[in-house]
Amino acid sequence: MRVLVLGGDGYLGWPTALHLSANGYEVAVADNYARRSYDAELGATSLVPIAPLARRVAGWSEVTGRTLAVFEGDLTDPVFTTEMIRTFAPAAIVHFAEQRSAPYSMIDQAHAVYTQTNNVIGTLNLLYAIAEVDPTIHLVKLGTMGEYGTPNIDIEEGWLEVSHNGRTDRMLYPKRPGSFYHLSKVHDSHNIEFACRAFGLRATDLNQGIVYGQETEETTRHPALATRFDYDAVFGTVLNRLVVQAVCGHPLTVYGTGRQIRGMLDIRDTVECIRLAVANPAEPGEFRVFNQFTEEFSVMGLAEMIKELFPRPVEIATVDNPRVEADEHYYHAAHSRLLDLGLRPHLLSDTLIESLFDITERHRANVDPSLFEPTVRWTAEADEVGPRATATVG
Ligand code: NAD
Ligand code: USQ
């Protein structure tokens, strides 16, 4: 069975491509290298060095004898997107290929417009290409738990039974996210649901929580197979950032009270969730939603866990929250559908001790501490980011 992984050069797309290939799928990866260019723009780099895509693909072939096809291009180009699907003829497409940082989308007007254009138009082109080339292709799309925001009721898996004035209907769960990036995912979800109804497509929207970790069974087989690990204030996600800060003896940057609660998962569970979704496709015309996370933590809870488990002293600092978000809120989100398919989750407390501290210690010399300071505020004024701003810190 052929699977096309869009965004296959990224943090999650690359290890997912390897995991699918290791499990017997014939895999192609596609990317426009936008993520590598954001590094140049922001003056940041992955903590763990990553090889160019061609070297990664050659490394996988050397280690396993398996080949990965590569398509270089941009999903916002409809001709590229349609021809790629026609050429590779996949049975499933896993779509990671979006601008995925909330702070990046909030830098200024241009970054908000870029984020929504890249994400919404790329996905729309993909929906049309699937409908034109082969509507039986199963689309597995990465959404995000942040689409829901933090409502004062339980979060369901995508849909909600609503009773109003004596009548009842099953409706898409109401969304109230916290950045223009997260909003782009809401727009995608609505467009995909409509394409399932209108064109008879089949899709799984994976509302994924925050991912942590850097190693999977496949990426550790050769240094050229390593995936990226971001700790800067724009692309670094919270747990990965706090671990690097602990290792460097920098106070952990907890924004606001730290009582914000988020769903999280290990990168090894991400790749397995994708395999499970591909192996168990949606029905024709079905738009199904899985909430893809395994444990819930408050940000302060994460900082306290690191302080408890890390072998050296750790200081926790609360800093002014650069974001507009609730830090006192109800949070209870359903997430049983991937467990029902057979997911066996890893636990954060184990991953911290078994690998995360060690990975960070090994690459500590690459850390630029100026990248710990938050640079993007949730205002309409433009923020200064990138090499110029970095040079003035410290
Ligand atoms: P990433 O930025 O590392 O990877 C995305 C890849 O897509 C990059 O290699 C980028 O170059 C490519 N890309 C972007 N726009 C493209 C376009 N128009 N055409 C072709 N390629 C394009 O991000 P990631 O952390 O691997 O996340 C992958 C997906 O998972 C994203 O959609 C993200 O929203 C979602 N997600 C990530 C997390 C997380 O914690 N990392 C959590 C929930 C959901
Ligand atoms: N936070 C801190 N200190 C930090 C960094 C972040 O307290 O140094 C806080 C933030 O204020 C926020 C929480 O930690 O309350 C999570 O922030 P994050 O940057 O780890 O996550 P987020 O911006 O939501 O985005 C990340 C990924 C995105 C994905 C999302 C999943 O970058 O691609 O969609 O996690 S979710 O949060 O479930 O929507």
Image: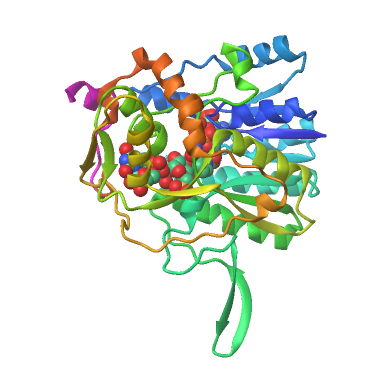
From the viewer's perspective, is 47 left or right of 340?
Answer: left
What residue is drawn where x is 63% and y is 78%? 169
- Residue sitting nearer the eye, 254 or 116: 254
- Residue sitting nearer the eye, 237 or 244: 244
- Residue sitting nearer the eye, 17 or 385: 17
Determine whether 258 is above or below 153 in the image: above
What residue is drawn where x is 50% and y is 52%? 145
Determine whether 256 is above or below 248 in the image: below
Q: Is residue 98 visible?
A: no
Location of ligand 2 given as a quarter of the image: top left
From the viewer's perspective, is 123 left or right of 137?
Answer: left
Quadrant (top left/top right/bottom left/bottom right) for the C terminus:
top left
Q: Quadrant of residue 65?
A: top right
What residue is drawn where x is 22% and y is 43%? 318
**Residue 358 belongs to the span the image colors magenta:** no
Residue 31, image x, y percentages:
59, 28
Residue 167, image x, y percentages:
61, 87
**Residue 386 belongs to the span the image colors magenta:** yes
The residue at the far right in this view is 1
User: The magenta stretch spans which residues?
Assistant: 381-394
Q: Quadrant of residue 157?
A: bottom right
Residue 134, image x, y percentages:
80, 45
From the viewer's perspective, is 302 left or right of 117?
Answer: left
Residue 56, image x, y percentages:
61, 15
Q: How many marks?
A: 0
What residue is drawn where x is 74% and y is 26%? 21
